[in-house]
Structure formats: C-alpha cells, structure tokens
Image (cartoon, rainbow, N blue to C red):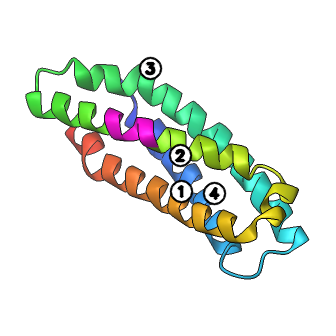
C-alpha cells in the first residue's frame, strides 16, 4: 500500500469536528448569530469534504479497485456507488444553505436537512474507517 492512510484519517477528524459543530448549533433555536456560524461551518465543511473526496478518488479508490483482493475491489466499488449519492445530497444542501439568510429563510427545512446530511457523513466515515481503510 503506497499511500498514507493517516492523512485520510486526519481529514476525517476535521470533517467530523465540523459536522459536530453544525449538529451542536442546530439543537437549539437558530438565531442570526448562530446562522452565521453555521453557514461558515457549512462552507468550511464543503471545501474540506470536496478536497478529501477528490483525494480519495485520485489515490485511495484506484488503488483499492486494482487490488488483487476481490473483496477489496467489491467493497471499493460499493463505496463509490454510495458516495455519488451522498455527494449530490451534500452539494444540494450546501447550495441551499451556504449563507445566513438562506438558513434563516427556512429554518425548519434547514434543520431537517442538516440532521440528515451530517448523520450520513458520520455514517460514511465510520464505514470507511471500519471497512475499507482496515482492508487497506
């Protein structure tokens, strides 16, 4: 294995930390101030997540897909298929709620979507770390 999984794991920590901050801020009433902080966190999360996924796509997944292990190839393919959907969901979420006013204009919808998206990201990272990363 030519790649350094520690770099990917470090990015996971940053992503999960931003996810936790967003989750913490949607548990109480959303104010002008918290909406501002949340929008900033969503934008940070977007850039970290996009770079991380691009890096996985370029380095991690091609290596897994060309592995001698059929189980590893199958797992990587399954993760790629799932990820396409999560990326689309996150991208829509980011476009819909990347500013304070977009959040405040539709707090209920925002809160529901934020809960769904952040949980999906957490699940994805847990799955990668307990599955694919272990196999690599």
- Residue for badge 2: 89
Q: Determine the secondary structure under disc 1.
A: helix
Examine the image and state in which quarter residue 58 appears. Answer: top left
Q: Residue at x 65, y 73 (%)?
A: 24
**N-term mark: 4 or 3:** 4
Mark pair 1, 2: CA separation = 7 Å
Mark on residue 58? 3
Q: Is residue 9 visible?
A: yes
* Mark 4 surroundings within 10 Å by alpha-carbon count, few (fewer than 14), some (14 through 19), many (20 or more): many
Earlier sequence position, callout 4 versus callout 2: 4
Residue 20, given in percent of the width and then of the height, sits at 59, 65
**Quick check: marks 1 and 2 in contact, CB under 8 Å?**
yes
Q: What residue is shown with label 4?
A: 18
In the rendered view, would you say 108 is above or below 36? below
Residue 111: x %, y % from top left: 65, 69
**Dot 3: few (<14), some (14–19), or many (≥20) neighbours within 10 Å?**
few
* Alpha carbons under labels 4 and 1: distance apart: 12 Å
């Amino acid at each position: 294995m030519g790649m350094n999984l520690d770099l990917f794991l470090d990015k996971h920590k940053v992503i999960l930390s931003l996810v936790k901050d967003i989750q913490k801020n949607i548990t109480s009433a959303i104010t002008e101030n918290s909406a501002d902080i949340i929008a900033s966190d969503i934008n940070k999360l977007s850039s970290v997540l996009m770079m991380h996924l691009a890096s996985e796509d370029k380095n991690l997944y091609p290596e897994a897909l060309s592995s001698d292990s059929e189980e590893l190839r199958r797992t990587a393919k399954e993760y790629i298929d799932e990820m396409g959907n999560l990326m689309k969901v996150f991208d829509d979420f980011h476009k819909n709620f990347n500013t304070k006013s977009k959040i405040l204009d539709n707090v209920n919808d925002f809160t529901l979507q934020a809960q769904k998206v952040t949980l999906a990201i957490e699940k994805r990272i847990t799955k990668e770390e307990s599955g694919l990363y272990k196999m690599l």
